[in-house]
Image (spheres, rainbow, N blue to C red):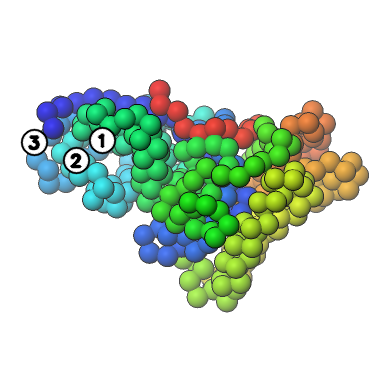
Amino acid sequence: SSIDKGSVTWSSPSNIALVKYWGKKQNQIPENPSISFTLNNCKTTTNLSYTKKGDSDNFSFEVFLDGKKEDGFKPKIEMFFKRVEVYLPFLKDYHFKIETSNTFPHSSGIASSASGMSALALCLMSVEQELSKADVIPSAVKESSFIKKASFLARLGSGSACRSLEGDLVVWGKHDAIEDSSDLFGVKYPYAVHDVFKNYQDTILLVDKGEKQVSSTVGHNLMHGHPFAQERFKQANKNLSDIISILKEGDLDGFVALVESEALTLHAMMMTSMPYFILMKPNTLEIINKIWAYRNQTGFKVCFTLDAGANVHVLYPEREAPKVLEFIQNELVAYCQNGQYICDVIGLGANKL
Ligand code: PMV
């Protein structure tokens, strides 16, 4: 290619899984399918500048977080580049400057890998497009294959990142009941979703902002030889089948039960692996008990979910938002580190800037 340099920018959100991905095979292939809400406010913006270099011997890149050089990300990105090189043959011909920033605090314990890796994958796709002058491809064709390939690449950076490109619900992992689902990339959830899930709210309570006790790589590997692994993978498949009618009918009781069970099962897997981990903190449990008490008292359909950490995602329908937010502020924020929480809502996916 004759193009010497250029620059592209993408903004991509985080996502929160309803049915969790936990356990993987070779090449970031999930042991079970998962489904997530795409978030709106928690996102990463990445500017990727590329400059042609003389040789093609090695990867060459530098990373800046909020304008400051950040070498801590380099090993993960180097690994990502190695995995995707075969699909993006220009990678060693250019020097890359990766400038990234998150809308949420970096050390918040909120995984930035989904938003960060999806933003980077999309930037690389845009570079590929610029280099190959892909404009000869009709834009409808280009669009569909662009997102698919970007999700495929994002998966190789961080599994859950492949669910962040589109909104508002994304499935990743082959499932018989979900048409066109794939282990290789995320797909937009293809069936009817009841209006009660429109603008669904996610308030993220930052209980513990410390370094993750267990990296997700270590966590996924703990599912190898785990005594309950096969039952868990079966359960995830059943939950994905069940969530189809829950989403269609607007069955909020079914939703609450399924989503909370998924969160606790994820943590149960970590408690019953060898070695074992407890990733919840005392305040995580305080919050869960408060949510249960509030739900019993009010009949509101507020529920929680968890990632592989102590923070709590509080999920509730938009129509309950004024009251539930009051409850969160009055009763739950006291359990957050420095009173920190983030109000988010289901979003529509990544954007090119
Ligand atoms: O994408 P990874 O490898 O960081 O795994 C994320 C796993 C969970 O966040 C715990 C669950 C999920 O499906 O997002």
Given the current orientation, which residue lies at the most extreme right position?
297
x and y, in percent, of residue 349 in the image: 51, 34
Name the residue beneath numbered marker 1.
128
The residue that appears at 19% across and 40% down in the rendered structure is: 90
- The reply to whether the C-beta atoms of the residues labelled 2 and 1 are less than 8 Å apart is yes
Query: Which residue position is annotated with label 3?
Result: 54
Residues at marks 1 and 3, CA–CA distance in whole angstroms = 19 Å
Decide which of tag 1 and tag 3 comes sooner along the chain.
3
| Extreme residue toward the top, this view | 353
Callout 2, which amino acid? Phe
Left or right placement of residue 218 versus residue 135 in this view: right
Left or right? Give the position of 266 relative to 148.
right
Residue occupying image coordinates x 50% and y 37%: 166
Could you say where residue 87 lies in the image, as x and y percent from the top left? 26, 48
Q: For the residue marked with disc 1, what is the amino acid?
A: Glu
Is residue 109 positioned above or below 348 on the image? below
Q: Which residue is mark 2?
A: 90
Tell me the quarter of the image containing the N terminus: top left
Q: Is residue 104 left or right of residue 327?
A: left
- Give the distance between the C-alpha atoms of the residues marked 2 and 1, in whole angstroms: 8 Å
- Is residue 336 in view? no
Nearer-N-terminus badge (2/3) = 3
Q: Nearer the viewer, residue 351 or 45?
A: 351
Question: Residue 302, percent across and down?
Answer: 77, 42
Q: How many marks?
A: 3
Callout 1 environment at 10 Å: few (<14), some (14 to 19), or many (20+)? some
